[in-house]
Amino acid sequence: MSLLSDVLATLFARQSRKALPPPSERTTQELIGDILSTQGEISGLTAAAQLLDRFAQMGDDEKLAFFDHLAGDLGIEPAKVRAALDAFEADPSAAHYRRFLASAEPARQELARRLNRVPGATTQLVEMRADLLRLIPRSDARARIDLDFRHLFASWFNRGFLVLRPISWESPAAILEKIIAYEAVHAIDSWEDLRRRVEPADRRCFAFFHPAMPDEPLIFVEVALTKGTPGSVQKLLAEDRQALSAQEADTAVFYSISNCQAGLAGISFGNSLIKQVAEDLSAELPNLETFVTLSPIPTLAAWMKEEGIDPAKLDAEALKATAARFLLTAKRADGMPYDPVTRFHLGNGAYVHAVHAGADTSPKGMAESAGAMVNYRYDPDAFVENHEKFAGAQEVVASREVRALVPPPAAA
Amino acid sequence: MSLLSDVLATLFARQSRKALPPPSERTTQELIGDILSTQGEISGLTAAAQLLDRFAQMGDDEKLAFFDHLAGDLGIEPAKVRAALDAFEADPSAAHYRRFLASAEPARQELARRLNRVPGATTQLVEMRADLLRLIPRSDARARIDLDFRHLFASWFNRGFLVLRPISWESPAAILEKIIAYEAVHAIDSWEDLRRRVEPADRRCFAFFHPAMPDEPLIFVEVALTKGTPGSVQKLLAEDRQALSAQEADTAVFYSISNCQAGLAGISFGNSLIKQVAEDLSAELPNLETFVTLSPIPTLAAWMKEEGIDPAKLDAEALKATAARFLLTAKRADGMPYDPVTRFHLGNGAYVHAVHAGADTSPKGMAESAGAMVNYRYDPDAFVENHEKFAGAQEVVASREVRALVPPPAAA
Amino acid sequence: MSLLSDVLATLFARQSRKALPPPSERTTQELIGDILSTQGEISGLTAAAQLLDRFAQMGDDEKLAFFDHLAGDLGIEPAKVRAALDAFEADPSAAHYRRFLASAEPARQELARRLNRVPGATTQLVEMRADLLRLIPRSDARARIDLDFRHLFASWFNRGFLVLRPISWESPAAILEKIIAYEAVHAIDSWEDLRRRVEPADRRCFAFFHPAMPDEPLIFVEVALTKGTPGSVQKLLAEDRQALSAQEADTAVFYSISNCQAGLAGISFGNSLIKQVAEDLSAELPNLETFVTLSPIPTLAAWMKEEGIDPAKLDAEALKATAARFLLTAKRADGMPYDPVTRFHLGNGAYVHAVHAGADTSPKGMAESAGAMVNYRYDPDAFVENHEKFAGAQEVVASREVRALVPPPAAA
Amino acid sequence: MSLLSDVLATLFARQSRKALPPPSERTTQELIGDILSTQGEISGLTAAAQLLDRFAQMGDDEKLAFFDHLAGDLGIEPAKVRAALDAFEADPSAAHYRRFLASAEPARQELARRLNRVPGATTQLVEMRADLLRLIPRSDARARIDLDFRHLFASWFNRGFLVLRPISWESPAAILEKIIAYEAVHAIDSWEDLRRRVEPADRRCFAFFHPAMPDEPLIFVEVALTKGTPGSVQKLLAEDRQALSAQEADTAVFYSISNCQAGLAGISFGNSLIKQVAEDLSAELPNLETFVTLSPIPTLAAWMKEEGIDPAKLDAEALKATAARFLLTAKRADGMPYDPVTRFHLGNGAYVHAVHAGADTSPKGMAESAGAMVNYRYDPDAFVENHEKFAGAQEVVASREVRALVPPPAAA
C-alpha cells in the first residue's frame, strides 16, 4: 500500500522537474495578456511559466498589486453580463447561453486554468491563494477574487480526484517531514516522536493527496488502535507504552486531524477522510468495533470564563459535568454548537460518546480546556439519523452516559 | 517508464472497485434533489451513486428525459441573476460577488461535481456527455447544457492534470485492447498487427491519461522512427519490413493520432500531445533531427469532385501538384484551410513539408485522397513564427519544395 | 497486486537493456580462461558477456563441443580432491577445509557464477541448460555436468527468492503471450481464449517469477472459482458460461498447472505454488471452503491397454470405477503410483477426492484417459497426515466415495 | 528511479510479513533433523521457521552450541567422500558424479538452503553468519563452517542478483535510518545531517540491495558532484556551502563507501558499486569528466609511528610528501600496499591521483592520518592497464604530480 503512495509521488514528480523558463522582459500585465490572448497555447505556455516564476519572487507589495489587478481588471463586466442575460432570456438558445456563460465568468478564472497547464503549477496556485488570504482580509471587497479561486479549487480538488495514502515509516522522508511540520493538534517534536506515531503495529496515519501535488499532503489523520476507548492523550502517546498487535485492538481512535494547505482553506476534506479511513481499517481489521476520536475542546476554557466558572475550583467529576453541559448546550447565536470541533464532528454524523477530565495535561490542553477532552463516536449505522437530528433541530446527539452528566433544564 | 503507467492504472483501479449501492425507490428527480440538498454529503453520496447507476441502465428515451430535466429545471434563473448583478454593480463586495457567482452558475454544474465524488464517476460523466452529444443535435437549444459539461471538463481535464504514458508491448492487455478499438486512422486488425506498432525498436506509442480514468486513454499518437521522411504509409507498416535500432533513426514520424473519448469532444489535447512526445523523444534520442507527420488529406477527393477534377486522369506528379494546391489555397468561407487535418497541424505551428502520391493505397486512402498524403513538419524553432502567420493572415506555411508545386496566382 | 508484478518486470528489464559487448577475437577456451583467471572482474566481465553472446549464436555442434569442454576440462581433479581430503581428515582446520571445498567443486560451477554477473545472464544460463538437456541424453556420462547446473539452480531458484505474481488481463501483453505459449494442459487458442481464462471475476492465474528473470514465468497455475466441485473441463471453460462473482464461490479449482522453462527441469516449484495460491485466495475470499484440482489422468489409457481393457466397452460408471482402481492400485516397480500426476499431487499431501467420466472430451482427453478426469483435494488440515501415509506406506489416500468404487482385493 | 527502489522494497516486504510459526516442543537437533529429512517440504517448512525463530532468541552460549553442532555433526564424512571419489575416478558416469557431489557437500549447506525457503529467512541467515563471525575467531578450526556460509552467500549474492538503488530524501525513512546507522567513514549526526548528504542537487547516494532483503542496504556510496577535485572533506560537507546544479559539475567524488552487513563480510561488492554508479552518473550527466574518491589513509599515522616520523613536526608540504611516499612505497610482507584503502581502489583499477594535507581535520582524521587524504581516480580508459600493473608487478600507479612528491630510491 505504501508502495502506491510512493509511486504516485514519483510519477508526478518526474513530470514537474523541468527547466525554468527564460526570464521575460514583458510586464506582468503584458504576460497576463499573452496568456489570455487567443493566439494559442504556444507562446501562452511560456508566458504562464514566466508569470508563475515571477510571482514566486514577488514581495508582498507586488503581490498585492497583482491581486488588485486581478480584482480590478480581470473581473466580470456587468453591462456585458446584462446584455447576454437579456438575449438568453429572450431566446434560450445554445449560442445565447454560451455568450452568457462567457460573460459571467471573470477572466481571472480562465487565467488560473491556463496557468495550471504548466507542470507543477497546481501547487503554485494553491500557494498563490494562501498569499491572497494572508494579505487581504476576508472583509475586504477585494477579497471577492478569493471566491474565484475557491470555485476553481472546489472543482479541481473534488473528492473524486483525491487519493487516500497511508503514511508510515516506509514513506519518503520528504513526505514525513511535512507531517512533522503540519501536525496542528499534538505537536511532533522530532523524528523519533514521529516514528512513535507511524511505525508501531498499533499506529496508523493516512492522508489525502491530489495527483498533481504528490509531495503535499492535503489533510492527514493520526490513528491509534486500542483496547477500549482511551481517556488520556498523554497515555496514548507515552514513550514507554507497550504496542498492541493490530489484531488485538477493538477500537480505532482518531486522535489528531490536521489540514496542511493554507491555500485550500474552506475546501473541506475532513469528513471524507475519517469515513474512508474507518472503512479501510474495518476491511483490514475485522476485529475493530468502535471508531472514536479523542478530541480537544478548544473553546471550553473561554466559555467557562464567560460563564464565571473557575476551573481551578472544579474536581474531575465536576469538570466532566461542566464539559458535558458545554458540549450539549452551549450554542452560538445561530443555534450551532459553540465549539468548532463539535460542529465538525456532529456535522459528519458523529455523536458525543464520552468526556474525560485530566485527559490532556499539556500546557495547551490545560489552557484551552482545563485538561478535558471528548470522544466523538463514528457509528456508521447511526450516521444518517444523527446527522438529520443535527442538521434539522441542531440537536447535539450524545450517549446516555454523557447526557446523564447534564441536569435537565429547569422548567420555564 | 511503462511502469509508471501501469502503476497509475492500478492505483486508481483499486479505488474504484467498490460494491454497487443499494437500489433506490426514489424517483430520478428526487435523487437529484437529495444530491443537491445542503443536508450534506452523507446521504448525498449514496444518492449520487444510485443516480449514476440508474443512468447507466436507462434507455435513450429516459436519457433524453433526464437531459431535458437538466436543461429545464437545473439551469440559471435570469431574474435571480439580474438581481444579484444589480446588487454587485451597486456594491462590488465579496458577499455580493458570491451571490452573483452562485446565481450565474446553473445547478446542473454543482450536480456534476457532486456526482463526481463517487469513485469511478469521472468515466461515467464522460460517457453521459457522449450520450448527450449523440442524442441532442448541437443545433438544438437543449444542447446548451453541453456547454456546462464542456466548462467542467475543460477544468477537470486541464493539461496540468494529464499524464503522458508510453504504450508498449509491456502495457496491460486491458489498455492495449483499447488502442486496437480506438485507432481511427489506419485500423489495427489483430493483436499481431498491434504488436507491430508498439513492440519493434523503431516504433513508439504515447497516450494522455487522466488520473481518475486510468484505464481509458484520452488520445494517443503512433510514431515510427525512420531514416528520412517517409512517403508511403503501406511501406511504413509493411509486415516484412526490417526494424531499425532507435539510435539509427533521424526522423520521428507521427503517422496516426486518434481521439478516444466521444464524451471529450472539443476538449483539445492533440497539440500538447505531439509537442510533449517530440520533446520526450528528443531527450531520449539525440540523433532525431526531424519531427513530421504522415497525414491523410481526408477532404481532397471531395474538393476535387467539387472542382471537377477527375483523379483517374492525374499521374503521380499531377496529383502531387493538385494536392499541394489544395492544401495551400483551398479555404473555407472563414478563410481557414478546407482540410480539417491541415487546420489542426497548422494551428499547432507546423507547416506543410512535403506531399506524396501513391502514399496510401488502401481503399480508404484511395477514396479520400486518391492515395495522396502529406507530411506536416514540427520544427520547434519555427513554431511561434508559423503559428503567428497562420493565426494572423491565415497563411498556410509550406516548404519551398511544396510551394514550387503550386503555380503563382495569375495577376488580378 | 498486479501492480507489483508489473513493477518487478520493469525494474529488472531496465537493468538488462544494455549494449552488446564488442565481439572478441579470442577463442572460446581463451574466453573461459579469462573469465576464470584471478586477474579480477575488470576484463572478466567483458569476457563473460562475450562468451554468452557467442554461445547464443552457436550451432548445435559448437554447443556440444562447448559442453564437452565443460565436461572434460572444467571438472574436478580426483587426485587433488584426494590430497585435500587426506589433509582435512588429518587436521580438520579451516584452511584444510577451504582447500577441500575448492578442490571438490568443479571450475564450471565458478564459471557459471561469473557468467551470471552479466546483466540478463540468468535467463541465458537457463537456456544453456535447456540446450544441454536437449543435446545430451541423461544416460550419457557427459550429462554429469548437468548436475552442476542443477546444483547451482537449486540454490539460485530457492523458494525464498521466488515471487508469486497474479496474472490478469491487466498484466503486460509481453507476459500474457508467454502464458499462451507455455500452457501445457488445455491449450489456449487465441487472445480471446486467454482473456476468458484471466479476466472474468471467477478466474485467476498465478505464476512464480525470479527477480532476475522478470519477463519469464517459471510455472503458472490457472484457477476457476466455482460453486461445488466441477466434473467437466469443457463446461468449466465453455465460451458462453455465466461468470460468478468471486464472493459467491465456495471452491477453487486448479485446472491447469504448467512449467515454463525447459532449463529448470527438475527444480521443483509446483508444490509451493499450489499451497501459496490456496493460502492467498483463502485470505482474500473467506467463503472458499474447498481447494481441488481438475486433473488429467494422462497414463490411464496406456494402462488400460496393458490390462486389456477396451474403453469403448465401458459405460460411464464402469469407466469411473476403472479410473478409481487405476489411481488407487496401479503402481510402478518402486511402489509409487503409475500416474505422474498422481505422484505429484499425493506427494504434496493432496488426496483423491472424486473421479469423473466424460470430463475431458477433447481429442487429447479421449486419447489419454477415455475422457476421465480426477479431482485431487488440498485440505490443509490433512496435508501432513496424508503426506506421511503416502511417503511412508505409499498409500494413495482417497475419499470414501472413491474408495467405494474400488472392490476390496480378493483374499489371498 | 527512486520509485523503482521503493517498489522493490514494498514488494518483498509484503511477502515477509507473515505470522510466526507455532512454538515447537522438539529439540534444536530434532528440528534440524526434520528439516533435512526427505519426508518433504510440508512439515519441513514449519520446522525451518521454528528453528529460525528459536535461533533469534538464543543467548550466545546456545548459539555457540548450535554452531558446534553444525561443525561437528553436519559436515562431510571423509570416508564417504573417498569412496564416492574412487567410484567416480573408476567410471566418471553421471550417477557416480552425483554421488560424489552429494558426499562432498556438507549437510549444513542443504540446511541453509532449506531454511531459506521461509519468507524473510535470507536476512536471518546473514545475521546468523554475523553471530558466527562474532563468536568464533577465524583462527579457530570450528570457523570452517563459515566457509560454507561464504560459499552459499557468494552464490546468492552474485552480482547478477543485486539491484542498484539511488538513496534520496524521497527514500523511505526506514531505509534512511539505516544509512545513518551504517555510515562508517564520516559519521552522520542527525536527520538534518543526512538530508545534507542526499537532498541537495549536487549530492547523490547509491546502494546495492538484494531482492530478498529489500529493507537492508548491502553497501552504499556517497557522492558529491563538484567543480574540480576537492581536497578537504570538511569543506565538502560544510553546512553552509552553496549547492551546485548537477549540470554545472565536472567531477563526481566518491567520498564515503560503507559496508552494511557484518554477515556478508568477504563477499565483495564495492568494486561493482563504484563502477556502476560511475556509469550511471555518466549517462545522466554527460558533463562529468572526472571520477575520483576523497579517501582516508587510515594506517598512515601508525606507519609514521613505526618509521619514527612525528607528524607534529611536518608542515603541509612535508606531510603530503610523506603521505605520497607511504602510499607508493609502503608494502606488506606479501608486497601489497600497506594501506587497506589503497589495496581496495588499486585492486579496482584506480590510481593515486592527488594527496592533500589538512584534508580531514576531524579528531578521527587527525588521529589516523594527521589530516591527510588522497584522491584515487577511476578512469575507465585506464582500468585494465592499471589493474594489470597492480595485479602483476604490484605497482602502485600514480599521477605524475604524486610521483614527483616521492624522491627516487637511492641507487643500490
Image (spheres, coloured by chain):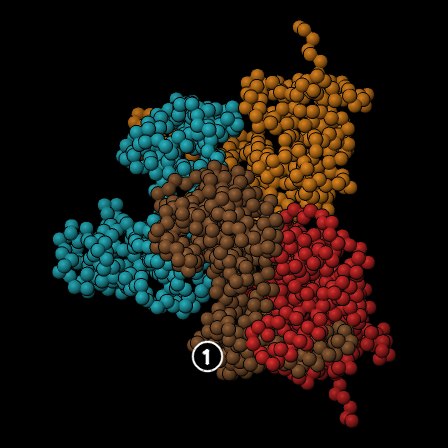
Chain colours: A orange, B cyan, C brown, D red
Residue B388 image point, x, y percent: 35, 53
Residue B265 x, y percent position in the rendering: 34, 42
Rendered image quadrant of residue D82: bottom right
Say whether residue B22 is left or right of residue B185.
Answer: right
Task: Work out whether residue C162 or residue A229 is closer to the camera in this orientation and state it.
Answer: C162
Name the residue located 56 percent from the left edge and 76 percent from the top edge: D93
Residue C186, quarter of picture: bottom left
Q: Is C398 or C292 nearer to us in this picture?
A: C398
Q: Quick one: quadrant of the C terminus of chain B?
A: bottom left
Q: Is residue C23 above or below residue A411?
A: below
Q: Is residue D76 visible?
A: yes
Task: Give the secondary structure at mark 1.
Answer: helix
The structure residue drawn at horizontal position 78% and vertical position 54%, both measured from the top left corner, is D58
Asked whether, in this view, residue B100 is left or right of residue D217, the answer is: left
Name the residue that disc number 1 marks. C62
Query: At 45% across and 66% down in the image, what residue appears?
Result: B286
Amino acid beneath label 1: Glu
Who is closer to the viewer here, D244 or C7?
Answer: C7
Which residue is at the front of the view, A100 or C328? C328
- Residue B6 seen in render: no
